[in-house]
Amino acid sequence: MQDFLGVIIKIFNVIQAPGATVMMPVIIFILGIVLGAPAGRALRAGLIVGVGFVGLNLVTGLLGGALGPAVQAMVSRYSLTMDAVDIGWVPAAAIAFASQIGALIIPVGILVNVVMLLTGTTQTVNVDIWNYWHFAFTGAMVDSLGQLLGMGSGPAYAMGLAAAALNMVIVMVLADRSAGGLEKYNELPGISIPHGFTAAFVPIAALVNLILDKIPGINKIKVDMEVIQKRLGVFGEPVLIGVVFGLIIGFLAGYSPVQVFQMAIQMGAALVLIPKMAALLMEGLIPVSEAAQNFIEKHFKGHGKIYIGLDSAIGIGHPICLTCALILVPISIFLAVILPGNRMLPFADLAVIPYIFVLIIPITKGDFFRSLVIGLVLMIVMFYCGSSLVELLMTTAAKADPATYAPSVYVGNFSSICDGSNPLTWAIINIFKLKWLGAIVLTAISVALAVWNRTLIKKEAKSAA
């Protein structure tokens, strides 16, 4: 059995190793062929998706590369000191994949997706296997928690694997439920976002939005980004918005005049280029999405619409995502200083703030004001979630990669906005403090959500027939 698992792990490590930009075209091509798309269209779709991912990575890299040094300059300029530094999502993902849970997460994730598709409890074909690390991260944290609670390594590992699988089930349901709004308000037809970080904010965002509906005066405020852009004319264009906020961030960082203007142009470029790269990616996905729909209608009547599950990077080109994110960068640093009990110093992951807003937009129906308010609330929630998980994250990191994170090697405390401050990860970890009772509780919640989702899928399919 051990040898068989070793072979499976090696196969999926080979698939994972080249990265999304290489393997995504291959996966999209194979998926297109399986779903009945002509070979030529499937090949073009795969290549265009690959090019779109390369472009998107380049531009988001530009955004992160500009914001990172600016934030570091702000930290130095204002002598900010917190207990735990945000090390960013890249180390967090490496920790997740280096863990024992990470070794099996891709085959486990594919199995969960297939079972949910066959049982009609999801509409999403989640091809974004590289982001399965979010589920592995949760599982690895629960594994460490189990051992800290006195469970043996075997039971703790089993509990961690269960946490990772159940985390994915919950995220798949959230992806399905937000896909309709994603098509309407984000203009992403046939797409869902089963992203472990982005989808985690949907329940809290929905709750805050409901509260805003009940507050007199506040519930009347409506701010449409398209209306703002039309009224402001050229000053409402994404490039001008990016330039203005780039100037503000550069000024707060204490940059020289030349550096301030460089920052401004880079931010303007990011706001212009990210939507164009996302549109290119969508162009490649349309033939596969159409083939998937035809396949389902032919072979699985009553299963409703099928969505291709992708990285939330495809949705960050929306002007609300980028504008709200740029506003929240300096505000987040200010919040970190004034919030009582906060231990986190936001740093490396401030560039992922746009990802928070992708699935907030459908909830607020594209309203800028509500999206910004919800984003502000979520940042506060994340600071406290991240602060409470510092020690557990450090324990998990040391266990997964002792050469880098053992206490004798790594000096100081650390956390991350993505995924060390993920509210869904935080909730799952706290449920598993009940050990196996927590596993039973989370299983019951996940199964209930899956069954509820299946009922809605059948209802929607019947209405569309």
Image (tube, rainbow, N blue to C red):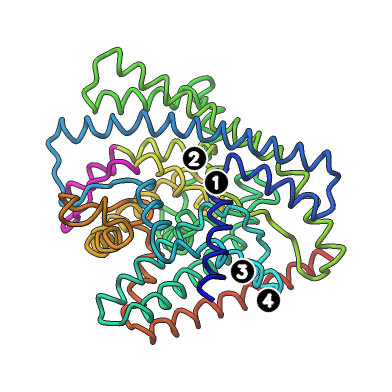
> What residue does disc 2 label?
320
Of the two numbered discs 4 and 2 in the rendering, the one whose residue sits closer to the viewer = 4
Which residue is outermost to the top?
258
> What residue does disc 4 label?
455
* Mark 1 touches mark 2? (CB < 8 Å): yes
Of the two numbered discs 1 and 3 in the rendering, the one whose residue sits closer to the viewer = 3
Residue 158's image quarter? bottom left
Q: Earlier in the sequence, mark 3 or mark 4?
A: 3
Residue 443 coordinates in the image, percent (x, y): 49, 80
The answer to whether residue 159 is above or below residue 324 is below
The answer to whether residue 373 is above or below residue 320 is below
Residue in view at x 34 percent, y 46 percent: 88
What's the CA distance linking mark 3 and mark 4? 22 Å
Q: Earlier in the sequence, mark 1 or mark 4?
A: 1
Amino acid type shown at disc 4: Thr
Residue in view at x 15 percent, y 54 percent: 408
Q: Is residue 294 shown in magenta? A: no
Q: Is residue 6 left or right of residue 29?
A: left
Instruction: Pick the residue in front: 367 or 275.
Output: 275
Decide: few, some or many residues near mark 4? Use Cα within 10 Å; few <14, some 14-19, many ≥20: some
What's the CA distance linking mark 1 and mark 2? 8 Å
Q: Which mark is residue 111?
A: 3
- Magenta stretch: give its range: 330-349
Amino acid type shown at disc 2: Ile
What's the CA distance linking mark 4 and mark 2? 32 Å
Which SS class for mark 4?
A: helix
Of the two numbered discs 1 and 4 in the rendering, the one whose residue sits closer to the viewer = 4
> What residue does disc 1 label?
366
Q: Earlier in the sequence, mark 1 or mark 3?
A: 3
The answer to whether residue 196 is above or below residue 322 is below
